[in-house]
Image (tube, rainbow, N blue to C red):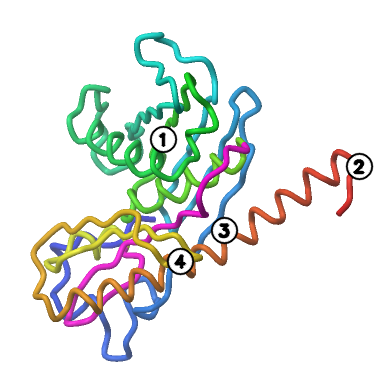
Amino acid sequence: RRHPPPTLMSKREYISPQGLRIDGRRSTEIRRVQCKLGIFSHVDGSAILEQGNTKIIASVYGPREATRRSEALPDRAFVTCEYSIASFATNERKRRPKSDRRLKEKGLELKKIFETLINTHRYPRSQISLFVQVLQSDGGDMAAAINACTLALIDAGIPMQDFLTACTVGFLDGSPLIDTNYTESSGPGPEMVLAVLPKTKEISYIQMTDKLPIQNLEVMMESATEGCLKVYELLKEKVKAHSFALLHARGTSL
């Protein structure tokens, strides 16, 4: 169920006097995360991820021969990404054409993120294609898309530098809020999307939706990193369980 529209709430209602957010979480709590790998048999890798009420599907084709020889790179694979939103994903029931500029920009951002993360040098003259679809949008879509793509690439067996996880952080009522939902994202404060490599805590991607006083930037980055690491711990266990299930199905044990 959707959270109340932000226009019906006063600013002080984003965080209650008891320190609770509108969905009952504390400021440092992430939403419930559920995921499943290998949901499609006709692709090389796939995953569905739910982060709160936001639901994303990611699929991977490849590595495979480049569809256009002119695009093939002699020393590495090239990565493509298509990002789309289902017409029923938001309260705005409308079809978004593939030529929608915002969708293209998000697809390009995901392409840049993962072409630096994937060990593309292992697959010269090849193509790796990512397809991301938002089935339900309730805030933190970009972060959830990054997490879903990571899972789909792992399912495809494509080697990467590290396990990449992302989290969205808002700043409302003078406090950072980890893993914001739609209502919080629509609030008056700035918002940050951060993706990190958990082993080194190296930042792979950062995006700000608004200007932020420099004294609050470090606090938001620390909170976002904390959220990324929490997401990582959850997804890592899901990947382990999926791997063990595959080994068991093949009659193999560790």
The magenta span reads 157-180
Instruction: Report how far apart the C-alphas of labels 1 and 2 lie in the structure.
Output: 32 Å
Q: CA distance from mark 4 to mark 1?
A: 27 Å
Residue linked to disc 1:
132
The reply to whether discs 1 and 2 touch (Cβ–Cβ < 8 Å) is no
- Image position of 20 with respect to 86: above or below: below
- Is tag 1's residue or tag 2's residue first in the polypeptide sequence? 1
User: Between marks 1 and 3, how big is the CA–CA gap?
Assistant: 18 Å
Q: Amino acid at mark 1?
A: Val
**Residue 159 part of the magenta segment:** yes
Q: Residues within 10 Å of mark 1 (few under 14, many from 20)?
A: many
Earlier sequence position, callout 1 versus callout 3:
1
Label 3 vs label 4, nearer the camera: 4
Is 47 positioned to the left or the right of 177 in the image?
A: right
**Viewed as shown, does residue 156 lie left or right of 68?**
right
Q: Is residue 95 above or below residue 183?
A: above
Compared to 238, does 149 lie above or below?
above
The image quadrant that residue 236 belongs to is bottom right
Disc 3 and disc 4 in contact, CB within 8 angstroms: no
Q: Circle 3 sits on which residue?
A: 235
- Whole-percent x, y for residue 174 in the image: 17, 82
- In which quadrant is the C terminus drawn? bottom right
Identify residue for label 4.
Answer: 200
